[in-house]
Structure formats: structure tokens, C-alpha cells
Image (spheres, helix red, strand yellow):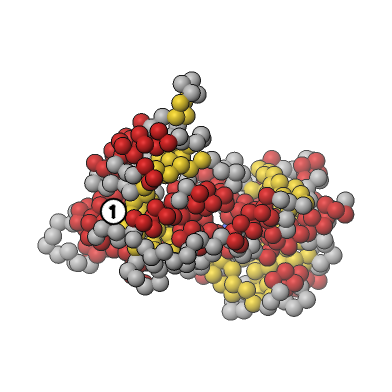
Amino acid sequence: MATKYIFVTGGVTSSLGKGIISASLAKLLQARGFSVTIQKFDPYINIDPGTLNPYEHGECFVTEDGAETDLDLGHYERYLNIPTSQANNVTTGRIYNHVITQEREGAYLGKTVQVIPHITDEIKRRMLLLGQSGEFDIVVTEIGGCVGDIESLPFIEAVRQLRWELGVHESCVIHLTLVPYLKAAGELKTKPTQHSVRDLSEAGVQPDILVCRSEHPIPSDLRRKIALFCNVKQNSVIESLDAETIYDVPLLMRKEKLDERVISKLKLPHKADPNLDSWKEFLGRLKNPTAEVNIALIGKYVELPDAYKSIIESFIHAGAANECKVNLKTFQSENINPDNVASLLGSMDAVLVAPGFGERGFQGKLDSIKYIRESNIPFLGICLGMQCAAVEFARNVLGLENAASTEMNPETPHPIIDMMADQKEITQKGGTMRLGAYTCELKKGSKAYSIYGKAKIIERHRHRYEFNNKYIADFEKAGMVASGINPDTGLVEIIELQNHRWFVAVQYHPELKSTVLNPHPLFVKFIKAAIDYAKSK
Ligand code: GLN
């Protein structure tokens, strides 16, 4: 079967949840036996989101092949349970970069290089790329931003051309809009949807299906009205109500028959009704907890929860695996000091210190870890969180005054964490960290080994600094063991404290590999430790 293409656009406002709708639809189609992937096209000019501040764009999601991508790819992986790659995220910057490089190489000699056809050709080439691998029956393409934005125009134009070139029934367009409720009038309003569909139609793209976000059920007369004004069938006006959790959305879309509409538009064979048994089982466990824990998340971007998206979702997956409600309490590390740490963290059942960059909030993380270590509270450190755990141990257990990471203090007499050798010559910022999947070997008999139940693991990375191996022997003598090591480079991937209830810190990012169907073992066991600790109190 030739690959079919589904384009998802958005109108009226951003943040309607295009990523979740795309992932939910893909899940339903996958559950019917189709092989499906999702890609995201982002209209901004950065080559990738890797150089963006988390406050700007939320978390940067890293793929197995080391691409720094939009956080929606995290949703795609968590829903579909298959890895994405560099090819699944394309920005305007990447498109232009390619076309301009080609131009310099003489690929268009004699020609004026223009948005149409050169930029749109490159967009189309990228849109078809995953489909041409022969691996997928269906490729869902989410177009970032809002219809009507200047910067998304070339993407919409590319969709217009592609639909024509692919032929009828080979593609369909789903447009996500908002049907707001006006409290004063006591009414749902369809005008913003009409306008946004008109914008899309003016660009030459007629949507096949409208998914309407709404805080109230949309009655059938309103659906009829939307259908009439927007040239879609009434049964293709799909209502998307606010959901209790994002993981309810596939079931809500199933109820609204979004997958059936798509199958009929694309003339896809009816393979089977979606098998969502394991998904429903997950939801059952999520919604019927038998335990409850309070877990602290300490970071410096906590004002914006999107900055820690994958960590937050990993807790949801692992909470469900333990049938445990996880109350995640966030703490701005800048506000933590030795005087208030006990009152802030004393009642927590476990504490996670998050990844991050730079000096701000560093000391607060060290103060937190000292308290957690001494109070025997379960602890998980991730990336910078692991580096903080190492520095704290060096200062307060090994007595190495002014021990530090050279990221925070280049002059430190004890560079416990130092820049990786191959990073020292790098001057460019974009895409130059140690990124993506690397192997790690676990020490037999260690906590890490018992958590994973195997000796060799592969995890994803995003860092420039590493544990300084000169200090391993001193650390191990004092009870902090390097239990995970990269077998090729000797880089320390995991440290864990002996004589502590549960103290594990990792250089890699386990949160990037947790999915609904495969909750990450580190998070699962971390929550188990929190439950046990809560019970013992
Ligand atoms: N800033 C640290 C480094 O570059 C940690 C990075 C992170 O937490 N992702 O090594």
C-alpha cells in the first residue's frame, strides 16, 4: 500500500494541543494495525530548538540519533512507543539552510532562488521523506504555529501543492480550531472557526476534518452550522473537550470517530477495530491508585512546566505502573538554602534534582542534596542533578573545599565535573553537545543493575561536562560508587550512594525513553522507593 499522508494544521490560537491530537490519532491508527509515524514542521528560523531557552519553547527533546527537537516529539514517542529521529522534526531554518547551501554549491546555477518553488520543493521533499522509507503506511505531519501566520505560509503552500500532486484519497487535512464559550452570552461561538477555515481555504487548502477544541459539548445544530460554513461534512466536525489527562484523548477521539473519518477519507482498508487494551489498562491503573506519594522536583525553570515535560510524563507512567498517585511539587532551586531546606523538603517522600545549565540555582541544588543525603530520603539526580550530587559529595564528605563543576567555576581547585575533552575545541553552540544514545555498562551487584535487571543499557544524552575520573577512587572509598560506565570512553554515567535508602544519579536522561507502554525502570523503582519510604515513616 502506498503511504498516505495526514496533515494537521491549527487555527485561532496556539496551544490548542495539536501535538496531542496528532499523537492520539496516530495511536488509534496504530492500534488498528497500521504502521504510523508523526513528524513536526516548525515555522521558526532556528535550525533546531537546541539553542532555545526552556522558558521560550519548553523542553528540548533529544532523539536516539542525537537530534535536538520539539517537545511534541516526546508525545509522539510516548504515545506510539516507537523512536523518532532527526527526520521527524524540520524547521524553516533547516529548510533554508539546505537550500542556501545548495545554492552556494551551484545547484541552481543561473536561476533565481525563490520561496516558490525552491523552498516549497524542499519542504515537500522533507514531508515525503519518512513515507518513502517504505516503513510506514501513514505519515502524520503536524504543522507548527497558526494558519494565517506569515511564517507558516510556505508550509501551507507546500501542503496545497502536495495534495494536488499526491492525488485524491492519498492525503487528508485535519484543522484544529477553537469554539470558545462566551459566559456573558451563555453561548458557544463558531465565528473564529469559520474565519480560520477561511484563512486556510484562501491559501488553497480545504480541510477535510475539523477538530474543535471546546470547554462545553458542541450540540448538533452548531456542528451543522460549522459544517455548512466550512465545507465539511457534519460528521467531520469533531468535538475535542478538555480531558482529565492527555492520555484520555485517544479514547475521546475514538468516541468521536476521528479515526473512522480519516480511514474513510483516505480509503484505507479496514484492518481491525483499534486494540486499545493495554492503553486502557494503563489508564485504569493511573486513575485507581492504591498509594500516594509527594515528590519534589527541584529545578530552575519550574515556572514553566513544559520545561520538564518528559520528567513530568515519566512520573505519570511510573506512577501508574505502581498504582500510585504522584503529587509532584516543584521547587525553584534559587529559593532553597540551608536555613529553609528542612522545612521545604522534610515532608517529601522522594526528591529529584533536574537537568539544567549555568550557575543560577546551583547552590540551592547542592544544599538540597546535602539535606537529602543526610536525611536518607530517596533521591534521583538527572544530568546536572547528577553533577550536583558529585560536587556536594566532594565538598561535604570528601572535604574538598570549593570543589565544583568547571561550568560554574572554571578556577576551582577540585574540578569534580569538567568539560569533556572533545568539547574543549568546540565554539559553535548549536547541536554540538554530546547528544543522543550511548551504551552504558552496569556494575553487577549495584542498585543500578538491580533496577534495570541487565548489564548493558542504552540511554540518551545532552551535556558538555562529565564526571572527572581522577576522583573515582576517592569517591568509591567514601561510599559513592560509579555503577554505570560507558565501555568505550570510561565516562561515568551513574553514581550511587551505598548506605543510603535510594540515592541514584545519572548523567543521561532516562525521562526521554519513558512511554505509556514502557515506563522507565529508573522512575518505576524510584517511585517504589518513595512508597516504601512513605510507609516506613
Ligand atoms: N550543564 C551540564 C552539562 O552541560 C548538564 C546538562 C544537562 O543537565 N542537560 O554537562
- Say which amino acid is labelled 1: Val
Q: Nearer the viewer, residue 486 or 458?
A: 458
Task: Name the spot of residue 132 as percent of width and height, x first.
Answer: 33, 70
In the rendered image, is residue 490 in sight?
no
Query: Above or below — where is 105 with respect to 190?
Result: below
Whether disc 1's CB lies below 8 Å from ligand 1 is answered no
At label 1, counting other C-alpha atoms closer than 10 Å, the crowd grade (few under 14, some 14-19, many 20 or more) is many
Residue 265 placement, left or right of 15: left
**Of helix, strand and loop, which one carries label 1?**
helix
The residue drawn where x is 43% and y is 60% is: 38
Q: Nearer the viewer, residue 39 or 350?
A: 39
353 vs 195, nearest the viewer? 195
Q: Is residue 99 left or right of residue 81?
A: left
Locate residue 507, reporting x and y percent: 63, 64
Question: Which residue is situated farthest in the right direction here?
Answer: 537
Q: Measuring 32% from the left and 69% from the top, which residue is drawn there?
A: 2
User: For mark 1, what is the residue?
Assistant: 159
* Nearer to the camera, 477 or 124: 124
Q: Residue furthest top?
A: 184
Left or right, 89 with respect to 497, comes to left
Q: Residue at x 48, y 58 (%)?
A: 28
Q: How many marks?
A: 1
* Left-right relation of 86 to 255: left
Q: Quadrant of ligand 1?
A: bottom right
As drawn, which residue projects farthest toward the left?
110
Question: Which quarter of the rendering shows the N terminus?
Answer: bottom left
Residue 476: x and y in percent read 78, 71
Question: Compared with residue 506, is residue 184 higher up or lower down, i.e. above or below?
Answer: above
Q: Position of residue 405 (x, y in %)?
A: 64, 58
Residue positioned 59% across, 68% down in the render: 459
One can see residue 232 in this view:
yes
